[in-house]
Structure formats: C-alpha cells, structure tokens
Image (cartoon, rainbow, N blue to C red):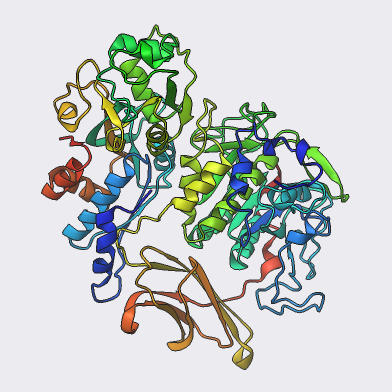
Amino acid sequence: MPNDPRISEQWAVAPRSVFNLQGAWNVTRGAGVTVAVIDTGARIEHPDLAPNVWVNFAEVPRNRADDDGNGYVDDVHGVDLTSTAKRQDLTDGYGHGTHVAGTIAAAANGRGVVGVAPRARLMIVKVIPTKGAGRTSAVAEGIRYAVANGAQVVNMSLGGTTRDNRVRDAILAAADANVVVVCSAGNDGLNIDRKPAYPVSYAAPNLIGVAATRPDTGKALGDFSNFGPRTVAVAAPGADVLSTTSDGGYGLMTGTSMAAPHVAGVVALMRSVAPRLSAAEIRAVLFQNAARSSLPIGSGYVDARGAVRGAAKDTEITLGQRPRLRVVRAQSAGRGRRATTVIQFGVSGATDAVRRYRVLLARRRVAELAPGPTVLSARVRRGGKRATVQALGDGGRVIARVRAKVTRVPKGKLDIGSGGDVGVG
Amino acid sequence: MRLPAVTAVLVALALAAPGAAAPAATIDVSGSTTALPLVADLAYFYRQEVRRPPRFSIVGGNSEAGVADVSRGIVDVAMVSRPRAPGDPARLVFAPFAASAICLVTHRSNPVPGFDRAQLQGLVGGSLTAWEQVSGARRTGPIVHTAFAPGTAAISVFLSTFVDDGTELAYKPRSFSTAAQMRAFVRATPAAWGYVDLAFTGGLHVVPFEGVPCTRATVADSSYPGRRQLSLVTRGAPSRPVARFLRWMRTSRTARRVIATRYVRVR
C-alpha cells in the first residue's frame, strides 16, 4: 500500500469502494505503459506528476528543431495543439488536465496523492486553451499524435455536440494500433443513447464510455452524469475526487472528467500485465469483470482487481488465423539523402509462427524486426513512395503482408483550428 | 477465456499452409462469455471446412455488451445467452443455435440429492440458513449462498425459472459476474451452493430440481426447466459472410458435433 499522505482522502482507493483498486496494485502498478492525456495541458513539474511524465528521447529540448521528424518541434513531453506556434506550451491554465493526469498516474512517492497506475507514463496532449473551447480538428490530431508516438491508452475527458468524422477516423485508426480510448460520458444528466455527445458516442471497438459515481462505496451515479446502456458501458468514481492541481497542490473536482481517468488508469494496469491483448480484448475483459449494477449503463462498475486479473489470464482467440498486419503510419520527412521514413504497423491473429517482420521501402529491404509487441515501428534514413511489411515464418516464408502508400509528414499544427467546439467534461 | 485445446493444437498446422494471406471478410463478434468458447470452436471448424473462409475476431464481454456493440454497428454479430429483452432494439435479429441450462450446484463433498421448489424459496427467502435444514445434505452448519450479479443473463434465467414471484429475496449471497468465477468459488467452498451454466458444472455436484437432473438429455427433451438459449444476434438481416456462417451452423454435421460437445443443438 502506498504511503502517500493524502491517500486516505481518495475514496476510490478505499477498500470499501466497489472500484477495488488495492487488489489490482498487488499485481501491477502500470509500469511500461504510456497514457496520453488529451486535455487542457498539465503542470508537468508538479512533484506528483514529474516522475511519470513521458519523455520523447528522440527530441532535443528547446533546439527549435523537429529532431525526430514527426512534424512537431521540441515535443519532449507532448504537444500543444491549441495554437499554431511552433513551440509546445503544455502549461495548464485551466487546471483540468493536471487533475486528470494525477488521477491516472500521480506517483506513489510518499507525497500527496497516488494515481490509479502510479508507474505509468503521462503524455500531455493539449487541445483545450485556457480561455474558450478547443476544436475537434485538434482533438483528431491529438489522437493521431498520441498513437504515432507510442501511447497505448488515450484519455479524453472532454466533449461537445459536434460530430466530426476526423475524430471518428482517428479513433478507428487508434484501434488498428491497439490503442484503447477512454471517454467521459459528459455532465448533462442525459441519456446519450438518445442525444449523442462526442467523442463518447462514436461507435468504435476500442472506445470505452464512462459515467461517474459518488462516494463512498461508488455505487450511486452522480445526478450530473450522462448515461445510456448502449453508449456508456461502465461507471467509476467521479465525484469529490482528490488529485493534483495546476498551482502545484491538491484539490477536489467532480464530473465524468474525473471518472474517465480512473478507467484509463485501470486500462494502463491491464496493458502492463497483458501487452499482447488487442484493444477490443482489453475492452471486453474490462466489461466482463465489471461489477454488475442496476444503473442505466451497459456493463457495470469498473472492478480494477477483476479487470487486471482477467487480463492477466486472458488469451486472444486466434483460431489459427494467419497474422493480420495493418499499417498504422507510413510517413516520410525530408528529401533525397535527408529523407527519413517511419513505418508503424499493428499485428493481430496467431503470431506464434512469426520469426521476424521485414520492412521494404520502394521494394528494398530496409529493416527487420523481432516479433513481440502488437505494434512495431521502424525508422529508416531513406525515402520511398510505397512501403511493404511482411511477417516471415521458418525459412523466411512470407506468412502475411501488407502494403501502404508513404505520405509526407502532415502539416500538424496548421490543421488544428477547424471543426466544432469541445470543452472539458 | 482459454483457447480451446483442440484449437491450440491445430494452430501450428493451420499456419503451415503455404502462401501469404489473401484478403478476406472479417466477422467481428462480441458478447456472452458463456457462448464464447462454443462460438470460437464453431468458427475454427468453419474455417477448416469452407473455401475462402472469413477471418473471425471474437471477444467476450457479456450479453449486454454484445447487444450494445451489434446495435451500434461495432461488431457484426453478438453472442447472447438470454432471450430477447423488452429493451432490446427492435431491429435486432436473434438466431438461436444452442440450448443450455442453468444448473443448481453444490460442493462435491455435499452431494445434496435434490432441491424442490419450496426448498429454493427457503434458500433465497432466508428461511433455510443451515445445511441441517436441507434434507439429504451431508453437511451441517451455515449455508454459503452464491448468486450472479444483477443484470447478468444467468440471474434472469434463475429468477424467472426457480423463484416464485411472491418470494422476497432475503438471503445475502456472494455475488459473481461470470460462471467461471462462481464455479471456482463453489469448488473451493464446501458449504456453498449456487447455479452455473451447463458447460461449467465440471468439478461440482449438480443438484436435480424436482427430481429432474440437469443434463444435455433433459435439456434436449425440455424436461429440465432452467433451459436457456444461446443466440447469435445481428442488426437486421445478416451480411452475406455472416449468413453463410449461420447457414453452416444450422446444416453442417460438424457444427452439430461441436455444439453437442457442450450443449444441445437448436433446430
């Protein structure tokens, strides 16, 4: 049990809570998993967050260059999609993202509070400015950034009424990369099966909608919380949640914004014990192990212990199907001898017979990768218009292959100001 | 969920086929974890028997999650282990493919010869609290009650079949979300009783109800009352690959054999 001094004020952590977190911590604390917080930024120097902030080691801080060729300058801890300025200002002027980040992964360091996955990493993706609303185009780009840069879980404690296919497409692309997307249900007290809210209402096999419960046992739904048995699958602690604040201290906040990060933290714990499960499997195991309720939601209360144990013993059903390869990203930057290409691909199905993966660019072999995780990526100093990925079995036999067109690194921040409004929630 | 043994053994054989994969339709399935092992086996053998088989992506969850996913177009097919409910979207099409049952169970060291309707009302109503009150029980001492959590398909079958409308549920059972969890608990708890799906009775004593044992034979002839259907559910008319799979399940001798390993085939 962590000895952080304010843990006794975190009702979700208490043994009587249906959230059942302490049992999960006996198995894992979320090490090795990166969670993207798509929100208002975060106070990354907060003593409870600093130990767990994600670091992009391919980027040199403050040199005003895009060292890793991902389209963003100096994106060392994340990216700021609220302005077209080249630099990344992750400052949280609103205080929302800092609170959300702390709920997911505040460090178990003997100070303040502890997050649900206290050893997970936090990638900060700022899409909502201090004043005014964010834009759905920025949210879509934020999801793409998170997936391309290695996040395995995305938390979106935000919402609006605008349906934007760019956001939906980004969520579905995240599914191809086995990234789980957790969304807050919203705070209007509405049945969103009837009156959709976005992004939670997008239909995707990797999306989990979360309603908010109240203290102390976590069994009563907050009267503010949206619901809907088809759209909102689970409920988690969301009222009177103590977490980190943007002034460097701690404070209480209430809303489904606070419930979603509890679930994102649980998903991070699950991913740390079951890195090879697909996003759809993780989602199914979470639902399967939820404590059933009579609330107007699909599956019930998230049970962290049950979900982690379920994930640890779960086996993906492959049916002997050959592995399926899906290119998540094939992008190049620079030209001629300075060209750099990144090929990121996801793998599903029976991979037991795969001995290695081969990457070809313009029909030339450029990389070979050992099997292991469900998402792999190769970065090569070469350009080309078409990329091919092959799964090779014994004797170099090709078991599966996929081809993709190589695109230029997108303009990134230039396409962040369109679409509908999104706000915290 | 565990990979079925026969499937696991044959994975390597399937991968030994020469050549690279050709593009194929994918059938996405989610829902009841009770139906999942059987559907996975059926999908496996279907892929062995037909030309140009589709890919299958099968995950669990629960019946409600399956219904939500299929009604929103997230999956092509939901696995559902309960009858159609009043709140289900009207456009959902249920295709029953197997009959199962909810069996009453006790620990093997306590082979109760049978429960009658009055005893079950006493158990859930709180008037039977010790095993010495249950005729034929080998144990003495307090009864440990188990039940499925509210909202599960199993509890709805149990309540509608075995519990009278006028019986007030006054007992305090240990609550479980899945049959595997309840089986593990009753196996490890000599004083426990509960109810699990027919395919999950291994290692437990199955208690006859009103003198009728819970077996595939009594499910087939409908003499056992706790029968329930496992269905595959689509949103409207199934797509061509799904319709082909459903037709194979109805007509194939192999499918009949696979279903009979666990349940009773529904024609």
Task: Give whichever of A142, A180 is nearer the camera.
Answer: A180
Direction from residue A223 to residue A131 in the image, left or right: right
Task: Give whichever of A131, A287 is nearer the camera.
Answer: A287
Direction from residue B158 to residue A144 in the image, left or right: right
Residue A344, placed above or below residue A44: below
Q: Position of residue A373 (x, y in %)?
A: 50, 67
Question: In the figure, residue A159 lies in which quadrant?
Answer: top right
Q: Residue furthest top?
A: B166
Residue B39, placed above or below residue B22: above
Question: In the figure, residue B208 lies in which quadrant?
Answer: top left
Direction from residue B243 to residue A109 in the image, left or right: right
Task: Give whichever of A410, B260 is nearer the camera.
Answer: B260
- Report the residue at 25% width, 66% height from top: B14
Q: Position of residue A206 (x, y in %)?
A: 51, 51
Quadrant (top left, top right, bottom left, bottom right) of the C terminus of chain B: top left
Direction from residue A225 to residue B5 in the image, left or right: left
Residue A26, placed above or below residue A392: above
Task: Give whichever of A4, B107 is nearer the camera.
Answer: B107
Q: Position of residue A314 (x, y in %)?
A: 43, 52
Residue A336, placed above or below residue B70: below
Q: Residue furthest right?
A: A247
Would you say residue B112 is visible in this rendering?
yes
